[in-house]
Image (tube, rainbow, N blue to C red):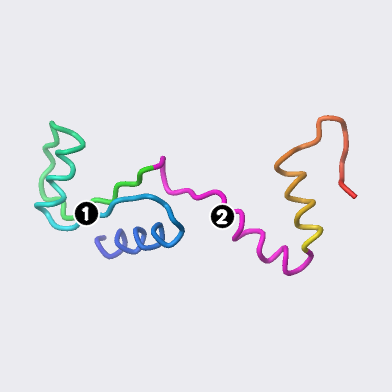
């Protein structure tokens, strides 16, 4: 489990996602008691505190998804992205 959490932390760090990784039972307990004064759980050995809600970096995800599209057809990928992000309200079904 610890190795998996450490890997997640490294992945988050690589994409600029703000999180804190605390290792060791003493430091982990101290960190949690700093967040929750009534913290009582015992036996924790590491904490991964994700600062934003959950693990999501939408712009990095979009870039990753669009990269193969750009390699195939940059213009089509950009037009498709615009249509998805800004759906037409006037019945327009494409951009030329």
Residue at 18%, 42% in the rendered image: 32
Q: Position of residue 3 (x, y in %)?
A: 27, 65
Quarter where residue 14 is shown: bottom left
Residue at 87%, 41% in the rendered image: 93
Toward the right, the furthest residue is 96
Residue at 26%, 54% in the rendered image: 21
Residue 75: image tag:
none
Dot 2: what SS? Answer: helix
Q: Position of residue 85 (x, y in %)?
A: 70, 42
Q: Which residues are magenta?
A: 52-73
Q: Is residue 92 left or right of residue 74?
A: right
**Residue where numbered disc 2 is placed:** 61
Residue 22: image tag:
1
- Secondary structure mainly formed by the magenta segment: helix
Crowd tier of the residue under label 2, counting other residues whose Cα lies within 10 Å: few below 14, some 14–19, many 20 or above: few
Q: Is residue 78 left or right of residue 96?
A: left
Residue at 34%, 64% in the rendered image: 7
């Amino acid at each position: 489990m610890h190795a998996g959490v450490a890997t997640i932390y490294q992945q988050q760090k690589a994409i600029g996602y703000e999180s804190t990784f605390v290792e060791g039972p003493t430091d982990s307990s101290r960190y949690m008691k700093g967040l929750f004064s009534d913290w009582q759980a015992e036996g924790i050995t590491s904490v991964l505190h994700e600062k934003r809600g959950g693990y999501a970096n939408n712009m990095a995800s979009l870039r990753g998804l669009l990269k193969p599209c750009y390699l195939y057809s940059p213009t089509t990928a950009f037009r498709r992205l615009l249509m998805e992000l800004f759906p037409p309200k006037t019945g327009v079904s494409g951009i030329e």
